[in-house]
Amino acid sequence: MNGNAPHIVQYQGSKRILAPQILQYMPRHFRRLVEPFAGMAAISIASGIQRRAEYYYINDLNQPLVSVLKAAIEHPNELVEQYSSVWNEQFICEGGSISHYYKVREDFNRGNQSAANMLYLLARCVKGSVRYGSNGLFNQSPDKRRNGTSPKTLRQNVFAISYYLRGITEFSSKDYREVLDEAKPGDVVYMDPPYQGVSNVRDSRYLAGIDFDSFVEAVDCLNNRGIDFLISFDGKCGERQYGEDLPSELGLHKVLLNAGLSSQSILLGKKETTFEALYVSRGLQSHMPQTKKLQYDLFEDIVV
Ligand SMILES: C[S@@+](CC[C@H](N)C(=O)[O-])C[C@H]1O[C@@H](n2cnc3c(N)ncnc32)[C@H](O)[C@@H]1O
């Protein structure tokens, strides 16, 4: 699989491009992949295509986001039809497509949080990045240069994703700790919490942030219950490290995955590579590719 696994829509923080590197740290086959911070579920999708797990569990605190994933996987045709209808209205809206976006956003904030409305807002907003105000309302602006994913492209992607995940995926929208309570030995849990730069506070980028100490406690509990997991957690760009390391007492291996040149640095005329940290639980360390395992014995961090 290359970095172009199908996706429903662009989503800020998506691990779609890093998925091939992350999957190398999972067993070839296992019972269930649990994603408590699924976002647009790039890792479940990539893993589903490789038929790694028998079952999938997708969770995100953001309920409308989960409703998009559930509709895409369980009822792809209905979702594409409903999305087409919202998407096509932008071309006949009296005030033009920007005004149409604001109408859909208002409708969404008034309570019509249908999967089609959420999907249209995601497809049409700046950088696919959801933003919420302190009142909890969706307040991201439209991307004025794009009309959002066409229904034709959406159809192809959604049907591909549904093909691999339908009938074997369960969904929920709750706090990650409740999901971790349900994990069992034999599962692999993949966690991609909001970045620390935006955690410990209400997170306007994602609806909610997480508290670092509670997260460490939850990870420690997984260790004690013998559950395997991988955690994407900040990283570094050039000499700058983002976020705090997870404590060494957790016994995790930290590897740094090459996420490519930083677009922000390019804008500033520099060429700096971004590395994203991946923490591997004890039980999965035996699945690390041999060459990487050897490297790990020599260095604290491995640059893949
Ligand atoms: C970095 S994004 C995940 C991106 C995902 N890996 C992908 O490929 O699309 C983090 C996600 O965590 C969710 N989130 C934030 N706080 C949460 C919590 N307490 N419990 C569950 N999900 C949470 C956010 O809504 C956001 O979608």
Image (tube, helix red, strand yellow):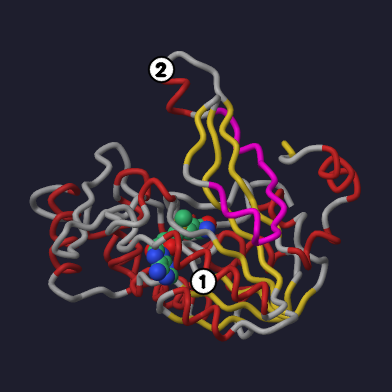
Q: In front here: 123 or 302?
A: 302
Which is more toward the observer, 180 or 98? 180
Q: Where is residue 113 in the image (x, y as percent from the top left)?
A: 25, 73
Check residue 246 for magenta coloring.
yes
Q: Left or right of 280: which side holds 208?
A: left
Mark 2: give few (<14), some (14-19) or many (20+) Cα within 10 Å.
few
Range drawn in magenta: 245-261
Q: Which amino acid does label 1 sit on?
A: Pro
Q: Is residue 127 left or right of residue 32?
A: left
Residue 293 tag number: none
Q: Are marks 1 and 2 in contact (CB under 8 Å)?
A: no
Q: Which quadrant does ligand 1 occupy?
A: bottom left
- Mark on residue 36? 1
Residue appearing at x 69%, y 53% in the figure: 22
**Residue identifier under label 2:** 268
User: Badge 1, how many Cα within 10 Å: few under 14, some, many 20+?
Assistant: many
Q: In which quarter of the image is residue 296?
A: top right
From what the image shows, is residue 195 above or below residue 52? above
Q: Which residue is drawn at 84% across and 60% down?
A: 287
Residue 280 place in picture, x, y as percent: 70, 58
